[in-house]
Image (cartoon, helix red, strand yellow):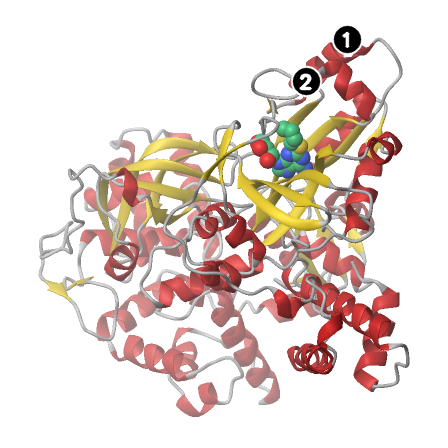
Amino acid sequence: MINNDIEELTQKFLNCDYIENTFDYYQNLIEVLIYHNNLYYIYNTPSISDYQYDLLFDLLKKIEKENQDIISPNSPTQRLVGQIQNSYKTYNHDFPMLSLENAYDTKDLFEKDKFIKKRLNTEFNYSLEPKFDGSSVELIYKNGVFEKAITRGDGFVGEDITENIKVIETVPLYLKNAKNISYIILRGEIVMPKSSFNKLNKKREKEGKSLFANPRNAATGTLRQLDPQVVADRKLVCFIYELTYISSEIIFDKIKTQKDIFIFLKNLGFTVYDWLKITDNIQDLVNICQDIKTKNYFENQNIEFDGIVIKVNQINFRKKLGETNHHPRWAIAYKFPAKQIVTKILDVELNVSRSASINPVAILQTVNLSGVNISRVSLHNWDFISQKDIKIGDNVWIQRSGEVIPYIVGVIKEKRDGNEKEILAPNLCPICDSKIIKVDTDVNYYCSNINCPSVIKEKIVHFVSKNCLDIDGIGEKLIYMLVDNGFIKHYADLYYLKDKINYLKSLPLLGEKRINDILEKIENSKKTFLRRFINGLGIKFVGKKTSKILENSIYEDLKYNNIDISKFNHQKLIKYLTDQTFLSNIHGIGDKIIFSLKQTFENQENLQILYELEKVGVVLNNFYNQKSILDSKLSGIKFCITGSFDIKRDEIIKILENNGAEFLSQVSSKLDFLIVGKGGGSKLQKAKKEGIKTISLDDLYTKYNL
Ligand code: IVH
């Protein structure tokens, strides 16, 4: 990516200490500008500031003004935007633009290899390159000058999109080193870099326009614009990967392999993606493909790829293998699992959360996306619904990448048939029919009933969850059953369940063993860490992170004032959490949190529950820091985690934290270890760059005898 020669040249231009005859000076300046443009738009890693780029651009304009006779058609100043067009003319391809055969698993690759080996019956090798997720294009040059750009269309007839392609800066308007080439046809892909895509969608969102589902749709949609200025603004990029035809046989005969094609294309001035692997061994090839797929290898690139294209490397063997009507027999695309999929919204369910907000959830026609069945997705609130104009019956794009919860990217409005139904905001609570509260400053609708059964259930579900009291064995179903049967009205009631064993036995699915197990876990939870207890209270704006900050600050204050930590209790906690002076001096605790804490503890009912928890024996004198300093194997060690593991991440973090380690969500120089699972992505790369130690979970367990 970084080219040191051009970097050096850049500095010379910027320092004005470059001496050369005008023509070379001018040509080099063009090269420098094209290089920085590519760094910015393709790789998203500029090496000079916008200001410096503008200085160089102004310099170019100045030279062109003073030396009009040397102006090059490839100069960034020469991409004049043409007229708005009315429609696109069709164009018959000189050679059919075929598609690719797809391989979804390694079995398909072995079969393809068998087929090719049988047909060729001689030694050969394969080339592997990324498969661009964009819009296929054919470029034609006559006597070294850009002539036409055609879409693939049906493979035989495409559309002439020359005016739109002309404004893409990676498409040379004039070829270099092409003296003997009177006619050449090339094939490549027009893509929208992820950074440009994100910027474009943000802008569209602000303007209330529908969003593009992915960079491919954005690139295709942009190419369909009749106004080339719109195309110019959206910063598309063109990568070339195939040579379809060249008029010079002498040159063609020198091009023997895919690598030769890439070198040749680069020489002409095209942008080629510099990633090409060669192998003559099918098992090797399969390993490379699998490795790239499982490690999500291209995830951090600014260009979206949806697979790997495997080609027979030797051009003369390609001719021998030939093609079908649909695809060449000498190539195959190994596809990555889709990150997005289209499905239908069948219905909308309204849930009431522990904060009493009413949350719409879309019930979907079940789809499998990267190995996970998805049948529900949150619609968040009615602002989100109206912003995306979502209706029941709509076809929508669902996206999920890595561990991210699936979400709706956008609606495919073209698929509407008029039977779609509005998603109406509620008039009454969908659970208890109470009145709804809605204020302008909040996007949510709320149930007005403080005893709404759903609110009660969700508060208890939160209280027992992993990051709170962590009472394993009590799931959502059981909590719902206990609330519905009137056994518990609040989480403090959990600690009275031991007095209701006979009632519990009468419930379905609850055998004696399970009841004992649950009761034991409830008892054990009485000695939780303070941070977990605070989090469990479910106070608005006081989640896991804030609870940790509060616990640490209280601990420091107790120590500083020499107060006996073992006597810390519920009353003292309330005192701290309502002490405005104490709270406002804590870094990370803002007015919103302070106000929320004040409101919570002004409410008598909330205070009552807290004292109830004290009465049943929940103690609050367990401070996390105290433990880590005294007796922990990983005390003071800071770690972060990337990739996937056989056990859940939360579980790993809990084990390590219980041993005194500190978890950081981002890679920074403060880290001691990055724990790497399968397919570590951007974090792994960053850690390597910054020289941070990486370790597998197994090695960490062995090293610290966990
Ligand atoms: S080679 C068909 N190489 O993928 C013969 N195609 O899904 C030449 N594509 O329509 C194609 N990246 O436009 C080739 N590195 C690459 C590619 C690539 C993307 C496109 C191609 C094709 C589509 C098939």
On the image, the x and y values in percent for residue 198 come to: 50, 60
Quarter holding the N terminus is bottom right
Determine the quadrant in which ligand 1 lies: top right
How far across and how far down the image is residue 499, in percent?
A: 30, 46
- Image position of 105 with respect to 374: above or below: above
- Disc 2 marks a residue whose amino acid type is Arg
Against 480, residue 459 (above or below) is: below
User: Which of the 4 image quarters holds residue 116?
Assistant: top right
> Front-most of 132 and 72?
72
Residue 529 image position (x, y, % from top left): 52, 64
Quadrant in the rendering for residue 55: bottom right
* Residue drawn at the location 44% of the way across and 74% of the way down: 569
Mark sitting earlier along the chain (1/2):
1
**Pointer 2: residues within 10 angstroms few (<14), some, or many (20+)?**
many
Q: Which residue is mark 2?
A: 329
Vertical placement of 506 versus 316: above or below?
below
**Where does label 1 land, which residue?**
119
Residue 701 shows in this picture: yes
Rendered image: mark on residue 108: none
Pointer 1 residue Cβ closer than 8 Å to ligand 1: no
Q: Amino acid at mark 1?
A: Arg
Q: Nearer the viewer, residue 122 or 337?
A: 122
Task: Pick out the residue farthest to the front.
Answer: 69
Question: How many numbered marks, from 0 up?
Answer: 2
